[in-house]
Amino acid sequence: MAKLIDGRVIAEKVYVDLRREIAELKEKDVTPGLAVVLVGDDPASRAYVRSKDKMCRELGLHSLKLELPASTTQTELLNRVEELNADSAIHGILVQSPPPAHIDETAIVRALDPRKDVDGFHPENVARLVLDDPCGFVPCTPLGVQRLLIESKININGAHVVVLGRSMIVGKPLALLLMQKNEKANATVTVVHSRSRDLADITRSADIIIAAIGRAGFVKADHVREGAIVVDVGINRVEDAASQRGYRLAGDVAFDEVSKKASAITPVPGGVGPMTIAMLMSNTVKAARQALGKAT
Ligand code: GUN
C-alpha cells in the first residue's frame, strides 16, 4: 500500500516559512498585496477566488478581490489591469482563468506587468523559466508539485519523470521546471498527452508519474510500475447522486487500484491543491520582496 503524501501538512510548513518572511517585510513597512480578478460567476472559479482571498487574510497579506460581471468588456478589463499595474500596494495580480468566451485571455495576460504576474503566465516569465532565471515567476501548480516532492524527500535528481498533459498552466511549465539544471530538479522528463502512442509503455518506465490531463480516473494500475511515485494534479467534478452537492471531486488517477502499486501517492482533495495556493502566496511575497529590492 502506498504512503499517502499529505499536501495540507506540507502546505502548513510552507506557511511557517512565509509568515517569517512576511513579518520581515512588514518591519520594512511593506505588506505584500495580491489582487484576484474574477470575471463572471463560474461556481468553481468563485470557490477558488474565495479560498485565495481567505488565505491572504490568514497570513496578514493585503487582499483585493475584484468580482466583475460576466458582461465586462475586454477594454474594461484591460483598464482594471492597468490600474492594478499602477497600484503600489498591489504586488501580485491574478486574473482567474477561464474568463467568459468574449474575453481574449492572451491579451489580458500580456497586459499584466510581468513583475506582478504571480501566475507566471506572461511571456516574459515563460522565457525566464526556459532560461533558468530565478527572478521570474513560475506557475503555482508546477511549483507546488516540485515542493511537495522535495518536502516528501523524493529524489528528483536523475529520476525519470513522466508528465501526463501539456497544458500551459501545468504540464508544459512543470516539464521545464523539473528539467532545470539545479539540485531541486535535474530530472529526465518525458511529456505524454492525448495523442501519444504507446502511452502506458512510457508511463510504466517512470520513477515519478505526474497526472495533469483533466480526465477523472485516467491513470490505472496498468500505467504504473511497482513502487513508482504518483502525483495527481486532476480536480474533476464527477456526478454523484449520493453527494449533497450532486458531484464529488475526483483526480486523474484511479486511486484505489493505483495506490496498491505505487510507493507514494497524493490524494484528491488534499494533495496538490493546498500546495498550489501556498505557492501563490509564496509568489506574492517574492513579488513584494523583489519590488522592495528595486525600490532601494
Ligand atoms: N484557473 C485554474 N487554475 C488557475 C491558476 O493557476 N491561475 C489562474 N489565474 N486561473 C486558474
Image (cartoon, grey):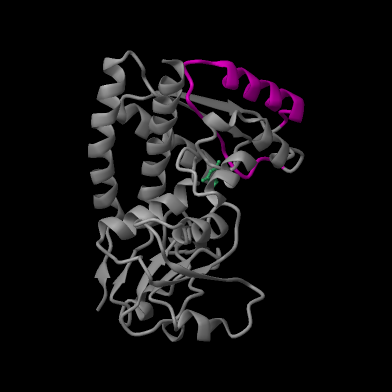
Q: Does the magenta stretch include residue 92?
A: yes
Relative vertical location of residue 165 with respect to residue 84 in this rendering, above or below:
below
* Residue 147 in view here: yes
**What percent of the width, then of the height, locates residue 196?**
63, 77
Residue located at (60% from left, 58% from top): 167
Question: Which quarter of the rendered image does ligand 1 occupy?
Answer: top right
**What percent of the width, then of the height, locates residue 38?**
58, 33
Q: Nearer the viewer, residue 129 or 71?
A: 129
Q: In which quarter of the image is the C terminus?
A: top left
Relative vertical location of residue 197 with respect to residue 58 in this rendering, above or below:
below
Q: Quadrant of the N terminus?
A: bottom left
Give residue 32's quadrant in the image: top left
Residue located at (32% from left, 60% from top): 149
**What percent of the width, then of the height, locates residue 189?**
49, 69
Q: What stretch is highlighted in magenta?
A: 71-100
On screen, residue 213 versus residue 220, left or right, reads right
Q: Nearer the viewer, residue 114 or 267?
A: 114
* Residue 272 in view here: no
* Tally of numbered discs: 0
Q: Is residue 139 magenta?
A: no
Give residue 87's quadrant in the image: top right
Q: Nearer the viewer, residue 290 or 22?
A: 290
On screen, residue 121 versus residue 221, left or right, reads right
